[in-house]
Image: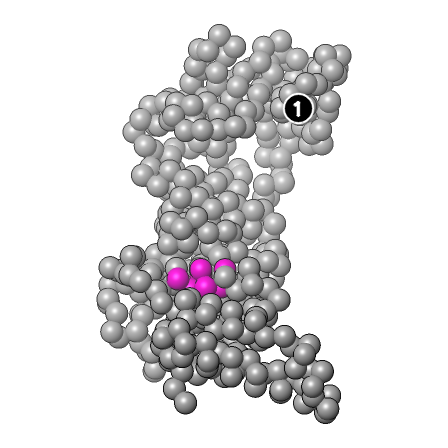
Amino acid sequence: MQTFIVGGAVRDELLGRPNADRDYVVVGATPEAMLAQGFRPVGKDFPVFLHPRTNEEYALARTERKIGRGYHGFAFHAAPDVTLEDDLARRDLTINAMAKAADGSLIDPFHGQHDLQAKVLRHVGPAFAEDPVRILRIARFAARFSDFSVAPETLELMRTMVGCGEVDHLVSERVWQELAKGLMEAKPSRMIEVLRDCGALARLLPEVDKLFGVPQRADYHPEVDTGIHTLMVIDQSARHSYALPVRFSALTHDLGKAETPADILPRHLGHEERSVRLTEQLSARLRVPNDCRDLALLVARYHGNVHRAADLEASTLVTLFEKTDALRRPERFQQLLDACRCDYTGRLGWENRPYDSPQRLLTALAAVNALKAGEIAATCADRGKIPERIHAARVHAVKQALNESGEHPEQD
């Protein structure tokens, strides 16, 4: 029985990148032998065990055989006669198909180290085409290793897989899982670009794919269409290390522009409502978590109001706070502002441009929060007029705060 470190831990060590997770492959063993040494079984589809002391995962060397559509359609074979090279051959990319022996020697049958040096994402072999999840994984790795290119033959194979309908059999949970991971990488725009290059974006995220080729407003750079702008916005969200809900909102904030009537382009009147509808549609299909979906809907609907904060009256600001539940959900409101900052700075030459709207809004919100709504309600004889009275008090407080701060003072 021999044990090897495999996959990402080997790759990242060669790249000099930190990687706390280590995966092990055990060659020449049986489930019974693993149990006899105190390992605990966890795998349902194939034999995976937890180390009795470290809790790290150890998998028996295995091969895979395609028996159906999608990424569930596999039969696994794990036995003592399965070699390390057999196990490595079933992996997706050459840079993930390396192993390290106990003595520190590198086992690299598919030249992954060479591809690391050449900065190329290349599939291991024809079995790559059997698992459509690998299209998403390559796109995600492109977002992580943004200076790597996809090998031409690998990209062509991905296009063939899309054309054969393999991606149509991906379950929504797995699409979301890989999309979320890709959005959290250093340059998420690369994930979208790779998916678009192979045709998978149109099948998996058609709402995003349709943004490419849609012009932005007339006073903006003509070479930057709405799709390219969206890529710049999600990269801004990564640049600021924002949380996943902000990054997903950055991806979906302008979806409605893809359905702008041709006769009003390059204006996009009413795109907010269309963006909300399409974000709801995409979120339902992918079963997007509530925190990501809810913030994305707020950003789609209100990012224009946030951008125009300097021109909004106090009453409109208070209504914005009320509709976004900013008083009860200040953390989410801050995320709304973060996503709007990404939208504002996600333009050519605007990456470091000051964005003043958040400060005005936060000044106004602090004034609203300082009010004691309970005391106002207690002085109101007509209970039906309590919401109106509280709203009016909030508007007055905002006017006073903005005038005192000198930050775009409210005009009476």
Residue 113: percent from the left, percent from the top?
Answer: 37, 22
Residue marked by disc 1: 55
Q: Is residue 189 visible?
A: no
Depicted 407 relative to depicted 152: above or below? below
Does the magenta run of residues contain 303? no
Residue furthest to the bottom: 382
Residue at 40 percent across and 82 percent down: it is 410
Residue 353: percent from the left, percent from the top?
Answer: 29, 61
- What secondary structure characterizes most of the magenta part? helix
Taking 187 as reference, is 58 left or right? right
Q: Quadrant of residue 13?
A: top left
Packing grade of label 1 (10 A; few <14, some 14-19, many >=20) is few
Residue at 48 percent across and 40 percent down: it is 137
Residue 49: percent from the left, percent from the top?
Answer: 68, 23
Dot 1 amino acid type:
Asn
Taking 38 as reference, is 281 left or right? left
Taking 225 as reference, is 29 left or right? right
Tell me the magenta residue range: 335-341
Residue at 62 percent across and 66 percent down: it is 328
Between residues 78 and 214, which one lies in front from this camera angle?
A: 214
